[in-house]
Every structure is written in structure tokens, then in C-alpha cells.
């Protein structure tokens, strides 16, 4: 006998009834009435011309034929559930974008802008990695990254996002800040540094200030922590323009006298040259390339 689609509801009702050995419990699971489950089972028995359940006062129990069909139906249902689960997982991965970037840029530049991307693409799921270690773009790793650097890395395609500029900042409450009139005076303050490739010596050289003694009193591995230290009044920090914006806008930090010198490195969106971007990652890249032009 060929399996016809009109038997599928009856098979689903039978499988649930066989598993529970109870029509009422099967009905609750399927959001049906017990009489509807019974009707489906009887329809199946009539088509097969066999009894699938023995009915008695205490309930129902499977016949030998019912047990045989229940085993097959249960196995088929389990196989289908496995396939459906894998399809859901595959779809979830298809809609996921994995990004790697610097913590400082994620905190001050990327996060404030992300709502516009999410509003445009609410179906996508984002995973943002801000580990300090340089991320490898292995299979199963990030789709793309935002890197601060020279713009060329072996094996990666790089798209320029934006340049950066360096200038000194401090808390307006830091003693002596209001008395600074020129770039050379910044050297009077305790200085906060991070592990960036360009530091205070580069800035003073760019500001044409020579022969001053620099008191680099505090050092942090992360730019966000260096700026936070400046917010708390430990000293002056050398800020990168792209990550300093929210601190300046809130008044937590103020610019000190002196020029903003262009950084040797800029920000780039990167991804493996040998691997085609998935559609979801392509959407994120296109958004990145457009957002800085707004």
C-alpha cells in the first residue's frame, strides 16, 4: 500500500498514542481532543485492515501489528526531527556574522553604530570577539575583522575604513589642565600610555616640541583602560580620534593644546582572500564601508 499524504495526520496521532499508550495524553501533546486522536487511529486501522490497539476499560495497549508500526513510525519521526534540527542549526549559522576587532574600537565606535545595522537586518545574529591576540581566520572562525594597521596582511583582503589621528586628552578636573596654553606644557602632566605603535614621543615630535622630559607614569595594554585612567584623573592620555569621540562628547575628557597628528596606521575591514564571504558577512562589510561615509 502506497503511503499517501492524507494518512500523515493519522500516523502522527498513532505515533503519539503509541508512545504514551494513552489517547488523552497524545491529544494533549498534539493539541487535539482524545476523540480526534481516536478517530485518526481508527481511520488508520481501517486503511490497513488491522487492529493497532487493544481497547479495554483501563485504556489501550498495542497489538503486535501496532508495535511493529509504532517502532517504524517512532524511528521515522526521530529521523525527521534530526533533519529539522540540523536545518535549523544550518539556518542559524547562515544568519550569523562573526566579527573580530579591538576592544577599544568595539566599545567606542562599533557598538554605538550597531543599532542601525540591526534595524536594517533584524534576522542576523552577531558574534563580536575582542580578544587581544591576533585572530586566525580558520574554518569556523570569524567571517571578517576590523584591524588597526598598515592596510596589508598576508592572505587577507583589506578594505580601508578610516584614518586615525592622535592628540592628548585629560579630565577637566585634573590639576593643572586649565593652565596649559601650548603643546609643550602637556609634558608637565603625568602621562598615561598604552601599547600602541605610536606614543608620546611621536606626538611631541609631530608637535615640534623637543628637549622636554616625559613622565610616562602609567601604562595600560588596552586603549580603553588608558582613556578610563585619564577620565579618573590619573594623567593625560594620547587618544586616537576614533575611540575618543564619546569621551569628548560627554565632557569626561577634554582635548589639550597641540595638534592632531595623523597616525601611521588606519582601520581596515579584513577577511581571508581565499574564502568568499557568506551573504550575511557581505551585508555587514557593505554596512561598514558605508557607515563611515554617513
Image (cartoon, grey):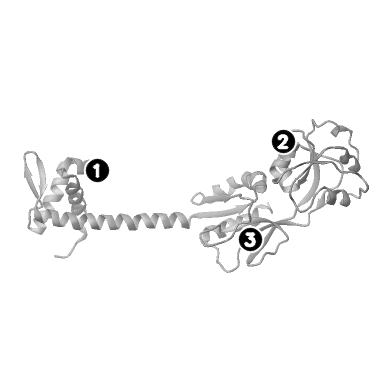
Horizontal side of 179 relative to 11 (left or right) equals right
Q: Position of residue 93 (x, y in %)?
A: 46, 56
Q: CA distance from mark 3 to mark 1?
A: 49 Å
Q: Earlier in the sequence, mark 3 or mark 2?
A: 2
Q: Nearer the viewer, residue 11 or 214?
A: 214
- Residue at 39% over, 54% down: 88
Res 29 label: 1
**Residue under numbered circle 2:** 250
**Residue under numbered circle 3:** 270
Q: Earlier in the sequence, mark 2 or mark 1?
A: 1
Q: CA distance from mark 3 to mark 2?
A: 31 Å
Above/below status of 256 relative to 291: above
- Residue at 38% over, 57% down: 86
Q: Residues within 10 Å of mark 1 (few under 14, many from 20)?
A: some
Q: Residues within 10 Å of mark 3 (few under 14, many from 20)?
A: many
Q: Position of residue 292 (x, y in %)?
A: 68, 53
Q: Position of residue 106 (x, y in %)?
A: 64, 47
The residue lying furthest to the bottom in this view is 274
Question: Secondary structure under badge 2?
Answer: helix
Horizontal side of 288 relative to 262 (left or right) equals left
Comparing marks 3 and 1, which lies closer to the viewer? Answer: 3
Question: Secondary structure under badge 1?
Answer: helix
Rendered image quadrant of residue 2: bottom left
Q: Earlier in the sequence, mark 3 or mark 1?
A: 1
Q: Nearer the viewer, residue 195 or 272?
A: 195
Amino acid at each position: 500500500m502506497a503511503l499517501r499524504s492524507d494518512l500523515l495526520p493519522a500516523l502522527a496521532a498513532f505515533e503519539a498514542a503509541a508512545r504514551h499508550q494513552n489517547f488523552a495524553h497524545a491529544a494533549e501533546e498534539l493539541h487535539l481532543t482524545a476523540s480526534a486522536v481516536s478517530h485518526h487511529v481508527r481511520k488508520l486501522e481501517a486503511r490497513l485492515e488491522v487492529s493497532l490497539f487493544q481497547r479495554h476499560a483501563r485504556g489501550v495497549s498495542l497489538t503486535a501489528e501496532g508495535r511493529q508500526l509504532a517502532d517504524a513510525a517512532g524511528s521515522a519521526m526521530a529521523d525527521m526531527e534530526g533533519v529539522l534540527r540540523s536545518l535549523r542549526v544550518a539556518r542559524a549559522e547562515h544568519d550569523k556574522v562573526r566579527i573580530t576587532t579591538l576592544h577599544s574600537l568595539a566599545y567606542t565606535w562599533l557598538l554605538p553604530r550597531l543599532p542601525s545595522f540591526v534595524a536594517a537586518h533584524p534576522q542576523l545574529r552577531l558574534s563580536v570577539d575582542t580578544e587581544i591576540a591576533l585572530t586566525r581566520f580558520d574554518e569556523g572562525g570569524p567571517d571578517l575583522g576590523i584591524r588597526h594597521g598598515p592596510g596589508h596582511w598576508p592572505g587577507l583582503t583589506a578594505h580601508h575604513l578610516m584614518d586615525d589621528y592622535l592628540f592628548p586628552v585629560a579630565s577637566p578636573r585634573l590639576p593643572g589642565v586649565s593652565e596649559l596654553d601650548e603643546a609643550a606644557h602637556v609634558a608637565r602632566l603625568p602621562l598615561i600610555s598604552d601599547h600602541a605603535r605610536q606614543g608620546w614621543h611621536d606626538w611631541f615630535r609631530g608637535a615640534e616640541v623637543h628637549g622636554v622630559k616625559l613622565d610616562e607614569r602609567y601604562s595600560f595594554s588596552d586603549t580603553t583602560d588608558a582613556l578610563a585612567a585619564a577620565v579618573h584623573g590619573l594623567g593625560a592620555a594620547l587618544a586616537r580620534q576614533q575611540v575618543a569621540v564619546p569621551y569628548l562628547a560627554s565632557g569626561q575628557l577634554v582635548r589639550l593644546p597641540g595638534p592632531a597628528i595623523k597616525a601611521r596606521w588606519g582601520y581596515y575591514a579584513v577577511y581571508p582572500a581565499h574564502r568568499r564571504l557568506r551573504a550575511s558577512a557581505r551585508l555587514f562589510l557593505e554596512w561598514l564601508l558605508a557607515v563611515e561615509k554617513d
